[in-house]
Amino acid sequence: MTTSTALLLADLAGVAVFAASGASAAVAKRLDLFGVVFVGFVAALGGGIVRDLVIDEVPPLAFADWRYAATAAVTAGAIFWLHPQFARLRTTVLVLDAAGLGLFTVAGTLKALDAQVPPVGACLIGMITAIGGGLCRDLLTGEIPVVLRREIYAVAALAGSIVVVLLDGLGYAGPIPLVAAVLLVFGVRLVALRRRWSAPVATLRPPRTGGIAGPPD
């Protein structure tokens, strides 16, 4: 198996995992078959579409290569019919989701760097590639996006993007360093889930009583 084939298969595996995540959320919201497939498609490919549009690569890969759209649609359709069995695999799905997060982070950052995007922009594009689909999924299903809540998700993707940019700047952009970057994102996400790490949340204090009275009626 060539390196390009291996990368394609890994990419499609990530698409399938995120499509399954999106489809599961749509099933939980009682959407119909089209809605489930659409949310699964957006969850799997939304981040990549945004990335390609930002770096001016049109049409986006999700539309230029039929294998990506087909993988997302078939996976989401399968979840529609098999969701009772799939629900029992929640732990496995979380592990695969963490792996997909790492893979999409590294792939998105590298693609931005190849398009001559400056380092800071490449870091942001890499993060958006990884979390964009999840953002769209949650918005379509009426949820506050996971990446804006307490979970260590976007932070892990941003850290991975920074590592990729640093490695590229130092001339260490070979397969082994990039795999290490994927494993970093994967590991941070799993440890955060295991130990229930979360980002700080603002503490809302109750309003003080005895303040200035309002105007008389």
Image (cartoon, grey):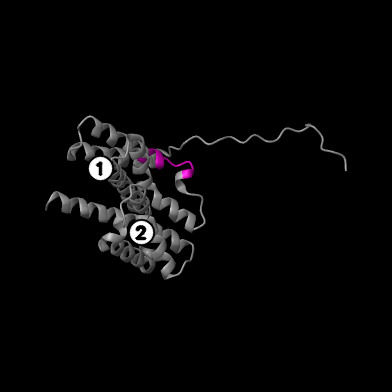
Q: Residues within 10 Å of mark 1 (few under 14, many from 20)?
A: few
* Amino acid type, label 1: Asp
User: Which residue is situated farthest in the top direction here?
Assistant: 170
Between 98 and 8, which is closer to the camera in this rendering?
8
- Is 111 a magenta residue? no
Query: Please, is residue 64 above or below residue 117 in the view?
Result: below
Q: Quadrant of the C terminus?
A: top right
* Amino acid type, label 2: Ala
Residue in the image at 29% along x and 37% along y: 184
* Disc 1 element: helix
Residue in the image at 38% along x and 67% along y: 80
Query: Please, is residue 65 above or below residue 114 in the view?
Result: below
User: Which residue is situated farthest in the right direction here?
Assistant: 217
Residue in the image at 29% along x and 56% along y: 61
Question: Measured from the top left, where is residue 9 in percent x and y?
Answer: 21, 55
Question: Measured from the top left, where is residue 90 in percent x and y?
Answer: 37, 54
Q: Is residue 170 visible?
A: yes
Evaluate if marks 1 and 2 touch, with contact meaning CB atoms under 8 Å apart. no
- Is 156 a magenta residue? yes
Residue that carries the numbered disc 2 in the rendered image = 20
Residue 205 lies left or right of residue 5; in this view the side is: right
Residue in the image at 16% along x and 54% along y: 5
Question: Measured from the top left, where is residue 191 in percent x and y?
Answer: 35, 38
Residue 102 found in image quarter: top left
Residue that carries the numbered disc 1 in the rendered image = 114
- Magenta-colored span: 148-157
Question: Measured from the top left, where is residue 55 in percent x and y?
Answer: 33, 47
On residue 188, the disc is none
Query: Please, is residue 166 above or below residue 87 in the view?
Result: above
The CA span between labels 1 and 2 is 30 Å
